[in-house]
Amino acid sequence: MTQPKILITRLIPSRGLDLIREHFPIFDISSHDLPPTREQLLEKVRGVDGLLCLLTEKMDAELMDAAGPQLRVISSMSVGVDHVDVAAATARGIPIGNTPGVLTDATADMAFALLFASARRVVEGEKYIRAGLWKTWHPQLLLGADFVGATLGIVGFGRIGQAVAKRAQGFDMRVIFHDPNAEPVYGANPVDLDTLLHESDFVSLHVPLTKDTKHLVNAGFLAKMKPNAILVNTARGGVVDQAVLYDALRSKRIFAAALDVTDPEPLPMDSPLLELENCLIVPHLGSASHRSRDMMSLLAAQNLIAGLQRARLPNCVNPEVYK
Ligand code: GLV
C-alpha cells in the first residue's frame, strides 16, 4: 500500500511526531527553526495528502489548490485558526483540526503573569536595578495596583476566559465578563461591554480573531476604560488597533498594557510600542509550557492521523464537512 504524503511545516514536540511515526514512517518535516516562506510552502505542499501546520503558516484557498484535490486534512497545532480559511477548506471538503483544551490553563496562567507583572511593575523594577538606580528602599518607588477588591473584566468567556475567572477568585477580585454566548461561572457576572469597560481595573481579552473582533480594541473602546486600567491581550494581536493603543498608553489615557500577541508577529523592532515603559510585550508565549506544547503536538498528530485514515477528526473546526 502506498504511504500517504505528509508535510509537517515546522519541527513540533516529539510526543506528536512519535505518534505520527507509529502510523506513517515517512513524512516531510521542515528542519528549519523559522517558518517556510510562502513560495517554499506552495512548492512543498504539492501532492500532499495530510498537512500539519502551525499558526505561522497561512492556509488559504491558493495553498489548498496548490496542494491538489487529494488533500485530506489540515491539522493545525493551535487552538486559534484565524490563519486558516475555514470556509475555503469546507468548500473543498477538507476537515481542519485544532488543539483546544490542552492550552487553557497555560494561557490563563500567562494572562495572570502579565496582569501581575504589569500591575506590580516587575519588568520596570528589574530594569531599574540593572540600570544601577537602586539606592534605597523608597516609600514611593514603582507603586502599582492592588488586586483584592479590584474588578477584572473578561472579554470573551470561553474556556480560557473562564479559567482566568477561576484564578481571579483566589485573589478576591470582582469578576465581570462580556460574552453573549456564555453562562456565568466562578462567581463572574455577565455585563454589556460598555459597563465592563467603565467598571474594570483590568481588562483581559479572550476572543478569537474574526472579522467581528478585528480591532475590537479601538479608540472608542479605550476611551471607555478607567485611567488606572490595565489591558491584557493573550488572544490575537489583530483584536487590538495598535496605533490607537500606542496613543492611549503614551497619553496615559490608560495605565498600562501587557501583550502576549501583536500584529504582526514578530513585532518589528521599530514599533513605537517598544518605546513605552507602560507596555509590556512577550513573544506569544500563552501556551508555552512543556505540558501544553506536548499535548498540542499530540492532539495535532491525532487529528492528522484521523484525517489520513478518513475518520472523523477528534477536534474538528468545521464538522459540517461530514454532512
Ligand atoms: C495559540 O495562540 C494558539 O492558538 O494555539
Image (spheres, rainbow, N blue to C red):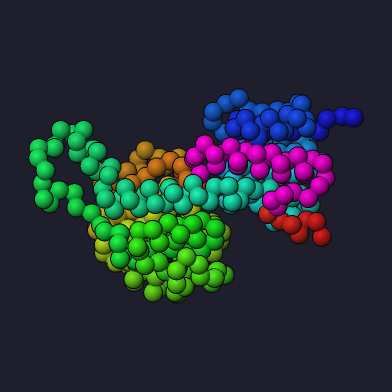
Main structural element of the magenta stretch: helix, strand or loop?
helix
Residue 261 counted in the magenta span = no
Q: Residue at x 18, y 49 (%)?
A: 142
- Which quadrant of the structure image shows residue 5? top right
User: Foreground: 200 or 278?
Assistant: 200
Extent of the magenta region = 287-316
Quarter of the image for the N terminus: give it. Answer: top right
User: Foreground: 182 or 238?
Assistant: 182
Taking 87 as reference, is 108 left or right? left
- Judge whether residue 149 can be spotted in this image: yes
Q: Residue at x 9, y 40 (%)?
A: 136
**How many numbered marks, from 0 up?**
0
- Which quadrant of the structure image shows residue 256? bottom left
**x then y, percent, for residue 269:** 37, 38
Taking 164 as reference, is 6 left or right? right
Q: Residue at x 72, y 33 (%)?
A: 20
User: Foreground: 188 or 47?
Assistant: 188
**x then y, percent, for residue 289:** 49, 39
**x then y, percent, for residue 293:** 56, 39
| 87 versus 15 height, above or below | below
Residue 311 counted in the magenta span = yes
| 156 versus 191 height, above or below | above
Q: Residue at x 35, y 53 (%)?
A: 115
Pick out the residue farthest to the right: 1
